Image (cartoon, rainbow, N blue to C red):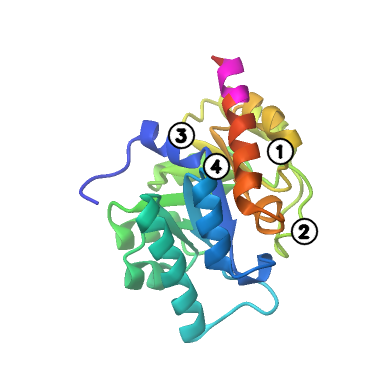
Amino acid sequence: MTGRVTPEMMRQYLRMYLVLGSVNCIVEPSRVVQDALAGGTTMVQFREKGQGALVGEPMIRLARRIQAECRQAGVPFIVNDDVELALKLNADGVHIGQDDESAASVRERIGNRILGVSAHSVEEARRAILHGADYLGIGPIYPTRSKDDAKAVQGPAILREMHEAGIHLPIVGIGGITVERVEEVIGAGADGVAVISAVTGAESAREAVEAFIGKIRCATERIF
């Protein structure tokens, strides 16, 4: 990557953002990714966390398989939290939470790769922007069982609050987002949706993603 991703391109990447690890999937994770990419997923985050998560070489092998699927599809591959792993794999970027290494430090280490930061308030969002974030992950918007460490539910109002406070960095909503809730999330100001269980737990990841894409398109057209 020769330069930082533009906000316009980042918004496109965020439209249908799949987040997953082995503990979230009912079938082999790289198969889920392959099917989701065929359905139109625009970015993938490898988040290998939770009880029973892989570590060491098995974790690295899974990350490489998922990364290979993303490269073949021309879709960015993001690593959650683990900067060392992201650099080892030459991943397209890193996503960090508020309890992880500081955004300023991660930006320094990853250069021009994509940097996503979870934010739960306007103050956290402003700090992330100051420290070099390319996008913000805002949530959990709705209750979620996919993350053991999820913060308090924010509701779509937090997305409107960000816009009213002048936060113009690309934003993705995350947490309990289903197809039925897409229009509410996009309508409140998100550029896209980040999804775990609604895709990884679906009978067909491809069909689930296609349903999300259809709703996202409708919601976006309604705004413009």
> Quick one: label 1 or label 2, which is nearer the N terminus?
2
Comparing 63 with 30, the one in front is: 30
Give the secondary structure at mark 4.
strand
Which quadrant is home to the C terminus?
top right
Badge 1 is on which residue?
Answer: 179
Distance between the alpha carbons at the discs numbered 4 and 3:
17 Å
In the image, residue 139 sits, relative to residue 111, either above or below, namely above
Badge 4 is on which residue?
Answer: 16
**Residue occupying the point 45% across, 78% down:** 61
Residue 181 lies in quadrant: top right
Distance between the alpha carbons at the discs numbered 1 and 2:
17 Å
Numbered mark located on residue 169 in the image: 3
Q: What stretch is highlighted in magenta?
A: 218-223
Residue 7 placed where, x, y %? 38, 34
**Residue occupying the point 51% across, 25% down:** 166
Badge 2 is on which residue?
Answer: 145
Residue 79 placed where, x, y %? 46, 62
Residue 124 showing in the rendered view: no
